[in-house]
Image (cartoon, helix red, strand yellow):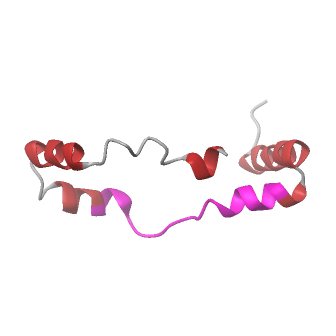
Amino acid sequence: MMKTQNEIIKQGYDALINSLGVADTIRFIQYFTPGKGDYTKERHQWLNEKTLADVFMDIKELPEDDLNQYDEIIE
């Protein structure tokens, strides 16, 4: 039998609490916020203004030494 969404959420919380403890589970969950707006619509608004060449130029302008952008999460 397929689990309900609530059963999956409860099982996920239980797994986090068993693995991290209550305090660290709360800290983990605080990293995620539900956001707002319509990402797909907004994405098309800024994407329609850029050419593929613009996107490549933006990528080339990124600092090459920024290899540790996820250190805060991975620590």
Residue occupying image coordinates x 11% and y 49%? 54
Which image quarter: residue 52? Answer: top left
Q: Which residues are magenta?
A: 24-42
In front here: 54 or 1?
54
- Count of number-bearing discs: 0
> Is 24 on the left or on the right of 49, as rendered?
right
Across and down, in percent, residue 75 comes to 67, 46
Across and down, in percent, residue 15 comes to 84, 42
In which quadrant is the N terminus drawn?
Answer: top right
> Is 12 on the left or on the right of 19, as rendered?
left
Farthest residue to the front: give it.
65
Which image quarter: residue 29? Answer: bottom right
32 magenta-colored: yes
Residue occupying image coordinates x 57% and y 64%? 34
Answer above or below: position of 26 versus 6: below
Residue occupying image coordinates x 51% and y 66%? 35
Residue occupying image coordinates x 60% and y 52%? 72
